[in-house]
C-alpha cells in the first residue's frame, strides 16, 4: 500500500508540473492584443498591418487591435512599445526606419533597439519611389534634378515618416541638389498636399503611391532600389535615371518589448510565420505593393543588427545630422 501511495503521489506531482509548465503559454492570450503601428492611418505600413492583424487574431483566438501612434517619424510608437508591459499583449509593427534609422535621425531617440526590442518575425519589403504631382512639369527624374539644380532651394519635399525623410536626403546628397523639407505628422497628409500641388516631390512606398499614379493624380519618376522592383518592372531606378550611389528600401517586422516571456514570443513567432508563409496571404501582400519576405525571429534580429550598421555608415556619408 505504501508503495502504491508513493507512486500515486509521484504521478500527481508529475501531472502538476506538466500543467504548470509553461504557465504563460497556457494562459496567454486571455485578452485582446495591441499592435502599435508607428505611422498614421491610411499609409502603406498601416495597410499591411490591417491585412495581417486579423489573421494573427484568428490564430491566437483573440482580437488584435491596431493602435496608430504617428508622430516624430515613428519615435512615439516605438517608445510606447518599449515602455509597455512585457506580457505579450503589446506588439510593434516596426520598420527598418522606425527601429533602426531613427536612432541616427533623432538625437532624443529613447531606446536601444538591440536591447529594448525582441524580434518576432520579418514580414515584407517595401519598394520606395520618387513621386511628383500629376501636373508637375518634370516628366522624369532627370528633369526634376535639372530643375532643382537650376533653382537651389526653390523646390520642396514633404515627409510624414523617417523613411520619407531619409530617402529624400539620400537623393539630395547623391544628386547634389538643394530641396527644402516640409515635415508632416503622417505620410497620407504629405501625399494629399502633393496631389494638391503644395509640394513638389516626395519619396514614398510604391504601395501608397501607385493608386494615385494610376488615377493620374501623381506621377512616379523612378524606383529607389538597386534593381527594378518585380511589382513595377516598368519603372527605372534612380541609378538608371542618372543619380548614382543612391538606393533606398525598407522592411517591416513584428517586435515585442524586452522581457516578454520566451514561450509567448516563441508562440507569436510560430503563428506569424504560419501566416507570412501562406501563398494566399503573400498574394494579398503583393496586391497592395508589398514584397513578401517571411523570416523568423533570428533572421529579423540579424537583419536589425545589419541595418543599424548600414544606416550608421549611410548617414555619416550623406552628412545627415540628428535633429
Image: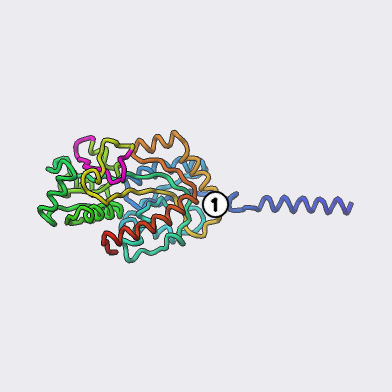
Is 119 in the magenta?
no
Q: Which is more toward the observer, 159 or 37?
A: 159
Residue 201 picture location, percent across and down: 19, 48
Residue 87 picture location, percent across and down: 51, 56
As drawn, is 118 to the left or to the right of 174? right
**Magenta residues?**
214-229
As drawn, is 270 to the left or to the right of 229? right
Q: Which is more toward the observer, 199 or 100?
A: 100
Which residue is the extreme one toward the bottom? Answer: 108
Does the image show residue 42? Answer: no
Residue 108 picture location, percent across and down: 34, 66
Q: Residue at x 49, y 59 (%)?
A: 258
Q: Residue at x 29, y 49 (%)?
A: 247
Residue ID for mark 1: 264
Local crowd at mark 1 within 10 Å, few (<14), some, or many (≥20)?
many
Name which quarter of the figure residue 51 lies in: top left
Q: Which is more toward the observer, 102 or 35?
A: 102
Does the image show residue 246? Answer: yes
Name which quarter of the figure residue 312 lies in: bottom left
Residue 60 picture location, percent across and down: 52, 44
Q: Secondary structure at mark 1?
A: helix
Image quarter in which the C terminus is found: bottom left
Q: Residue at x 37, y 40 (%)?
A: 291
As drawn, is 298 to the left or to the right of 226? right
As drawn, is 270 to the left or to the right of 249? right
Amino acid at each position: 500500500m505504501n508503495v502504491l501511495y508513493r507512486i500515486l503521489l509521484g504521478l500527481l506531482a508529475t501531472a502538476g508540473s506538466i500543467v504548470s509548465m509553461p504557465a504563460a503559454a497556457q494562459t496567454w492570450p486571455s485578452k485582446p492584443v495591441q499592435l502599435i503601428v508607428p505611422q498614421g492611418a491610411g499609409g502603406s505600413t498601416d495597410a499591411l498591418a490591417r491585412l495581417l492583424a486579423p489573421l494573427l487574431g484568428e490564430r491566437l483566438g483573440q482580437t488584435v487591435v491596431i493602435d496608430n501612434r504617428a508622430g516624430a517619424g515613428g519615435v512615439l510608437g516605438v517608445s510606447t512599445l518599449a515602455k509597455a508591459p512585457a506580457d505579450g499583449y503589446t506588439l510593434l509593427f516596426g520598420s527598418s526606419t522606425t527601429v533602426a534609422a531613427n536612432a541616427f535621425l533623432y538625437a532624443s531617440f529613447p531606446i536601444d533597439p538591440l536591447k529594448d526590442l525582441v524580434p518576432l518575425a520579418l514580414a515584407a519589403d517595401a519598394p520606395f519611389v520618387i513621386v511628383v504631382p500629376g501636373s508637375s512639369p518634370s516628366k522624369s527624374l532627370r528633369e526634376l534634378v535639372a530643375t532643382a539644380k537650376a533653382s537651389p532651394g526653390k523646390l520642396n519635399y514633404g515627409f510624414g515618416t523617417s523613411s520619407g525623410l531619409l530617402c529624400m536626403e539620400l537623393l539630395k546628397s547623391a544628386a547634389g541638389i538643394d530641396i527644402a523639407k516640409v515635415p508632416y505628422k503622417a505620410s497620407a497628409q504629405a501625399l494629399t498636399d502633393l496631389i494638391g500641388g503644395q509640394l513638389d516631390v516626395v519619396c514614398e512606398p510604391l504601395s501608397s503611391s501607385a493608386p494615385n499614379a494610376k488615377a493620374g493624380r501623381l506621377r512616379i519618376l523612378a524606383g529607389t532600389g538597386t534593381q527594378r522592383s518585380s511589382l513595377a518592372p516598368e519603372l527605372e531606378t534612380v541609378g538608371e535615371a542618372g543619380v548614382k550611389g543612391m538606393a533606398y528600401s525598407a522592411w517591416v517586422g513584428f517586435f515585442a518589448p524586452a522581457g516578454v516571456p520566451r514561450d509567448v514570443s516563441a508562440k507569436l513567432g510560430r503563428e506569424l510565420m504560419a501566416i507570412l508563409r501562406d501563398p494566399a496571404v503573400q498574394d494579398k501582400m503583393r496586391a497592395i505593393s508589398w514584397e513578401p519576405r517571411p523570416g523568423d525571429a533570428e533572421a529579423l534580429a540579424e537583419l536589425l543588427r545589419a541595418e543599424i550598421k548600414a544606416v550608421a555608415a549611410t548617414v555619416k556619408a550623406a552628412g545627415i545630422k540628428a535633429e
